[in-house]
């Protein structure tokens, strides 16, 4: 199962991105093999960024997302894909991974604003 | 960056008038100011801040639209039958009604090596503009007449502001009338909406609809009543309605002919300190900024 | 005669002009095309209006027939369809109701079901026929409601179409079948700027048009200068008057007063003359 964290730079000690849909990169870690890869998220300047980014998660077999915030539509799709969404703390991706493994991260309480792009 | 969006529902209530004064006041207090005009169909904010603008960025706005290759077209009329937007009539495309769905291209039976007789292209319908003005960084878009702002257009105008002004503490966003897609996109992601209310039967009716829309999007809102003095009965109805709906009214601005003079001289109203409206706008500004800062 | 009343800038007095222009005619229907924030019904309240809901088709996916090929997702220009890993998920708010997904599905797993986006109220106020469209807050396909109202009144001879502000596709839809357009503006730099944008739109559609300068203050103003320079017809200039403003704010028909009635009769006459001139 993979865990995904939106990051500002392609490194383990990068700060977690302030957004989900508009992040430029994701850190993906396979929780069994510990293998880490970085994914480009090409939706930061386009339409329906939240939905498309959530679709990216589903297509990469992500099981857990750790994010600072997440829009309503992205949440709807992630939930439908049985992906758990945790509230990131304002720290590096590495630190958030450790918090997740320690079980100290809370689930994302509420999705925020509805974004509509046509 | 905290974003304050100025909306109304009803047109002509004074959004741009208030936005321009807020920008001027903010600039007087802090050097870093940024603002956007999301009323991109008929923009007005640039008329107040038109002097000494230097472009920082200009990018084309693209819309996906259907076009017909008349050489290939056999006038079978299938595209006309399937188009749900009335954009296809007698083999002529109305690109302002075309929504770029691609169904016409899908059903078109005629194909050459390059494309079908009806095919989709990205048409430039205007420009996104970010400019540096004496008052701060300004993001807007200029569209061809009839092109129409979409949610994506509005979102990009706001995104551009974020890109150029990441460290600016407050952004003022001038919105458009209505409650549809461009308004919904304007509201998405802002910290506070300031509704400018008009004391009239139309103003009250439109307030109900815009408030419903803003509340659906879960963004906090406050209000102010503009042009007080013309219809006192409706001023009271507005106050009662706002109290009932728990919409805090942060200020009341009197009707003031000096406002028109200010606009016609491309000046923010607060440049005329003797104006009664200017005094109330300044008070409204202080309360709005305080409310914005206090939000969690 | 089908007259569309538009403005560019909001709050110049489109509804004020529209309802009064309708009121002075013997046989006419007023159509409120400002479906996002309709106001005409406040001036022309209908007695027992007929309310028809407006439905748009949205896709309905039969999961048992869906193979997960994602052809529908690839086709959709609006990102209204997604794959959850086991089934298709549809986002109504993104959907433009184009019908493309149901056409493109190779297993015919997608049919369409109706989804309500608003309604149309039809009735009359005294001698005026009234049709008012209303889009539900949160929905986006206002054009569909406008199209329906225009289709339902296509065979009527006399219409006054009260347009939304701006120059969006809602406005384009509203003016498309009009014989004449009246551009209501105000003598401010905002009004002038927005008016010029709308004039470009009207010229694009070859629509005969005239200007009404509302809330006029000075004898000389930039609108008049512009019109003189560009040979644009001014149908009327209505001065800023507190009593008129107050009357209008309270939802009353100004034309019930003989003095204001004359103003609108003159506008109507000028409009007819403009059409007559065009036809020659």
Image (cartoon, coloured by chain):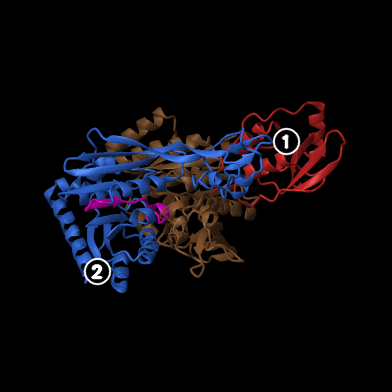
Q: Residue at x 16, y 59 (%)?
A: C266
- Residue B133 visible in the displayed image: no
Question: What is the chain letter for disc 1?
Answer: A
- Res C190 quadrant in image: bottom left
For label 1, the SS is strand
Q: Residues within 10 Å of mark 1 (few under 14, many from 20)?
A: many
Q: Nearer the viewer, residue A43 or B285?
A: A43
- For disc 1, the marked residue is A65
Task: Locate residue C27, reporting x and y percent.
Answer: 17, 49
Task: Locate residue B134, reporting x and y percent.
Answer: 55, 61
Q: Give the drawing colour for chain C.
A: blue
Q: Nearer the viewer, residue B215 or C103?
A: C103
Q: Which chain is red?
A: A
Q: Nearer the viewer, residue C273 or A59?
A: A59
Task: Locate residue C64, reporting x and y percent.
Answer: 62, 32
Spatial CA span between label 2 and label 1? 65 Å
Q: Residue at x 31, y 73 (%)?
A: C229
- Residue C36 visible in the displayed image: yes
Q: Residue at x 40, y 56 (%)?
A: C167
Q: Nearer the viewer, residue B71 or C175?
A: B71
* Membership of C158 in magenta stretch: yes
Q: Which mark is residue C278?
A: 2
Q: From the viewer's perspective, tell me whether residue C43 is left or right of residue C146.
A: left
Of labels 2 and 1, the one closer to you: 2
Q: Give the drawing colour for chain B.
A: brown
* Count of numbered badges drawn on the protein: 2
């Amino acid at each position: 199962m993979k865990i995904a964290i939106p990051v500002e730079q392609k490194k383990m000690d990068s700060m977690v991105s302030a957004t989900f849909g508009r992040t430029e990169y994701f850190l993906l870690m396979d929780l069994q093999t510990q293998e880490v890869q970085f994914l480009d998220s090409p939706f930061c300047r386009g339409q329906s960024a939240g939905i498309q980014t959530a679709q990216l998660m589903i297509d990469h077999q992500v099981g857990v997302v750790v994010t600072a915030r997440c829009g309503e539509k992205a949440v709807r799709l992630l939930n439908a894909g049985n992906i758990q969404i945790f509230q990131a703390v304002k720290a590096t991706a590495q630190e958030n991974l450790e918090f997740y493994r320690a079980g100290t991260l809370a689930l994302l309480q509420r999705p925020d604003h509805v974004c509509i792009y046509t | 960056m905290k974003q304050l969006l100025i909306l109304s529902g009803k047109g002509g209530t004074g959004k741009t008038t208030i936005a321009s004064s807020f920008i001027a006041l903010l600039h007087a207090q802090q050097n870093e100011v940024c603002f956007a005009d999301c009323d991109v169909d008929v923009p007005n904010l640039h008329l107040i801040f038109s002097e000494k603008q230097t472009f920082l960025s200009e990018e084309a706005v693209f819309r996906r639209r259907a076009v017909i290759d008349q050489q290939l077209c056999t006038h079978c009329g299938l595209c006309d039958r399937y188009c749900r937007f009335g954009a296809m009539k007698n083999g002529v495309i109305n690109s302002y009604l075309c929504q770029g769905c691609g169904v016409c291209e899908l059903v078109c039976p005629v194909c050459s090596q390059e494309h079908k007789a009806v095919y989709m292209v990205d048409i430039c319908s205007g420009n996104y503009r970010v400019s540096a003005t004496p008052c701060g960084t300004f993001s807007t878009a200029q569209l061809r007449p009839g092109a129409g702002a979409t949610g994506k257009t509005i979102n990009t105008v706001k995104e551009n502001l974020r890109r150029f002004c990441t460290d600016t503490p407050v952004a003022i966003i001038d919105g458009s009338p209505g409650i549809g897609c461009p308004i919904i996109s304007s509201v998405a992601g802002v910290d506070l909406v300031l509704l400018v209310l008009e004391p009239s039967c139309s103003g009250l009716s439109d307030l109900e609809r815009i408030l419903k829309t803003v509340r659906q999007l879960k963004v906090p809102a406050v209000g102010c009543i503009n042009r007080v003095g013309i219809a006192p009965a409706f001023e009271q109805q507005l106050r009662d309605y706002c109290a009932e709906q728990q919409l805090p009214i942060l200020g009341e601005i009197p009707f003031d002919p000096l406002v028109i003079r200010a606009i016609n001289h491309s000046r923010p109203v607060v440049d005329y300190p003797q104006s009664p409206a200017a005094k109330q706008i300044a008070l409204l500004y202080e309360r709005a900024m305080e409310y914005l800062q206090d939000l969690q | 005669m089908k007259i569309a009343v538009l403005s560019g800038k909001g709050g110049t007095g489109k509804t004020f002009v529209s309802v009064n222009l309708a009121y002075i005619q013997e046989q006419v229907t007023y159509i409120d095309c400002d479906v996002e924030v309709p106001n005409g019904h406040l001036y022309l309240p209908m007695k027992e209006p007929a309310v028809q809901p407006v439905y748009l088709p949205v896709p309905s996916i039969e999961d048992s027939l869906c193979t997960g090929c994602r052809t529908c997702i690839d086709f959709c220009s609006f990102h209204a369809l997604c794959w959850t890993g086991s089934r298709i998920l549809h986002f109504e708010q993104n959907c433009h109701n184009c019908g493309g997904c149901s056409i493109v599905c190779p297993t015919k797993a997608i049919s369409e079901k109706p989804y309500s986006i608003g309604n149309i109220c039809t009735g009359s106020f005294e001698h005026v026929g009234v049709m008012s469209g209303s889009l539900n807050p949160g929905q986006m396909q206002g054009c569909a409601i406008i199209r329906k109202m225009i289709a339902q009144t296509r065979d009527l001879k006399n219409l006054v179409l009260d347009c939304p502000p701006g120059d969006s596709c809602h406005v384009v839809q509203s003016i498309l079948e009009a014989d004449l357009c009246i551009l209501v503006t105000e003598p401010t730099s905002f009004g002038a700027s927005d008016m010029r944008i709308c004039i470009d739109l009207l010229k694009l559609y070859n629509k005969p048009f005239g200007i009404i300068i509302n809330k006029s203050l000075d004898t000389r103003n930039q609108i008049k200068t512009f019109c003189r320079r560009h040979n644009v017809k001014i149908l009327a200039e209505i001065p800023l008057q507190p009593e008129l403003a107050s009357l209008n704010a309270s939802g009353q028909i100004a034309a019930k007063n003989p003095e204001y009635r004359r103003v609108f009769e003159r506008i109507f006459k000028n409009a007819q003359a403009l059409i007559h001139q065009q036809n020659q």
